């Protein structure tokens, strides 16, 4: 599919030999859930409308990424991207310029059932829906909203639209939904969704993250192995953050049918920073070279100053050149006591 993408004239390279070709654009900081690992219960200060990327600006950034820098994947996220009523227009704008580029969204699934047809028609090719539990009470506790049925309707609609694979992202929180990992996998396998567990990262508004509470990728595998046999997916992982595992019935023969695959994204305990290919733009148009970075580069002001494509590209490339080695720093890692959590939460960065 990517064979027909334009030939890039530049790269988003950094000082550590990595080249970013995976673009995530956050479209909004607002959200209709309040997941405890992401947002505070209340008190978020939202960006003003004129501080947000307009649809045209989001399309221009995606176009520059694909055309000049060889971006191979464009993902829209947030906050909650479906809160943007012009999401289909943005996708259609990128699709018109780049018929071949994969365009995806990461969403909590609320109202996806009402929007999916127009998004697919606009050119959406993939969807990830975040869902941490299928127990309604636990969902309410985790997201601080009683909206599980709406998320399930969104997932069903995504499946019915023919998008493949429909991925489900889950974060496990100790004492809340960690014991439900195998139930969630069974639920996803039965319905044909590809589940991926993401280790909780220190990007929550309440600053409650603690390593001792972390449900690690190893623990996730252990929990799933109590119900299923897992074996490493034979397809090479490449630079993908998720290690995929084939799932078979418990104590079955090695050649028994694969029931499905499950991904484990061990961003904290099995760092993949050395293979990171991400470049992120926040909803207010800042380049963020790393999720954990303390530094951002204002691309929106450059766009709004009437800069040429080359001028915008130069600022973007400069910001990426300074991408830190790992976890927002060249020196400190998440394990060091000096590690400082970024001010912005995951919802404000764009996960
Ligand atoms: N609202 C959309 C959603 O929830 O899918 C898109 C934005 S959300 C910030 C993107 C992804 O980041 C979700 O899958 C969410 O579970 C994940 N996420 C948020 N906070 C996180 C954290 N502290 N650690 C790990 N993943 C996190
Ligand atoms: Fe909203 Fe997504 Fe953050 Fe949950 S993870 S609060 S759905 S932005």
Image (cartoon, grey):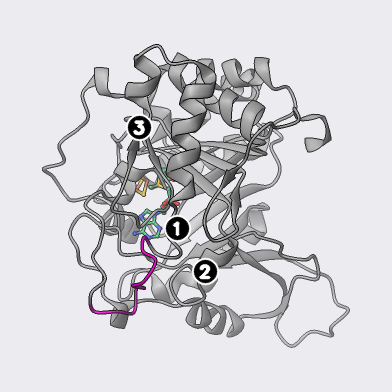
Residue with the mark numbered 3: 283
Q: Is residue 154 left or right of residue 138?
A: right
Q: Is residue 172 above or below residue 335?
A: above
Q: Is residue 216 left or right of residue 341?
A: right
Q: Is residue 83 above or below residue 267?
A: above
Q: Is residue 20 left or right of residue 52?
A: right
Residue drawn 66% across and 15% down?
96
Residue with the mark numbered 2: 183
Residue with the mark numbered 1: 134
| Span of residues in magenta | 328-337
Q: Is residue 39 above or below residue 61?
A: below
Residue 170, horizontal then vertical, whole percent: 47, 59
Residue 334, horizontal then vertical, whole percent: 34, 73
Dot 2 falls on a residue whose secondary structure is helix
Q: Residues within 10 Å of mark 1 (few under 14, many from 20)?
A: some
Image quadrant in which you'd find residue 333: bottom left
Q: CA distance from mark 3 to mark 2?
A: 35 Å
Mark 1 or 2, nearer chain start:
1
**Which one is nearer the viewer's eye here, 307 or 76?**
307
Mark 3 or 2, nearer chain start:
2
Residue 142, horizontal then vertical, whole percent: 29, 58
């Amino acid at each position: 599919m990517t064979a027909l993408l334009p030939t890039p004239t530049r790269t988003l390279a950094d000082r550590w030999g990595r080249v970013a070709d995976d673009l995530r654009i956050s479209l909004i900081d607002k959200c209709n859930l309040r997941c405890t690992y992401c947002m505070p219960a209340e008190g978020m200060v939202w960006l003003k409308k004129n501080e947000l990327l307009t649809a045209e600006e989001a399309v221009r950034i995606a176009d520059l990424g694909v055309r000049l820098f060889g971006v191979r994947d464009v993902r829209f996220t947030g906050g909650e991207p479906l809160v943007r009523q012009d999401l289909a227009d943005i996708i259609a704008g990128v699709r018109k310029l780049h018929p071949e580029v994969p365009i995806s969204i990461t969403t909590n699934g609320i109202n996806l059932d009402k929007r999916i047809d127009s998004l697919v028609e606009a050119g959406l090719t993939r969807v990830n829906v975040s869902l941490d539990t299928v127990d309604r009470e636990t969902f309410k506790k985790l997201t601080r909203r009683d909206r599980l049925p709406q998320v399930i309707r969104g997932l069903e609609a995504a499946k019915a639209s023919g998008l493949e694979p429909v991925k489900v992202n889950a974060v496990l929180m100790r004492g809340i939904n960690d014991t439900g990992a195998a139930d969630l996998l069974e639920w996803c396998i039965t319905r044909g969704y590809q589940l991926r567990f993401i280790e909780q990262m220190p990007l929550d508004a309440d600053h409650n993250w603690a390593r001792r509470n972390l449900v690690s990728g190893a623990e996730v595998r252990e929990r799933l192995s109590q119900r299923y046999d897992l074996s490493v997916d034979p397809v090479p992982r490449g630079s993908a953050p998720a290690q995929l595992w084939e799932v078979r019935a418990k104590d079955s023969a090695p050649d028994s049918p694969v029931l499905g695959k499950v991904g484990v994204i061990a961003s904290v305990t099995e760092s993949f920073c050395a293979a990171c290919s991400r470049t992120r733009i926040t909803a207010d148009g800042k380049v963020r070279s790393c999720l954990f970075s303390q530094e951002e580069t204002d691309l929106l002001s450059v766009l709004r100053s009437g800069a040429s494509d080359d001028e915008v590209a130069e600022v973007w490339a400069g910001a990426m050149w300074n991408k830190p080695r790992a976890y927002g720093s060249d020196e400190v890692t998440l394990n060091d006591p000096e590690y400082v959590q970024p001010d912005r939460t995951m919802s404000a960065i764009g996960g």
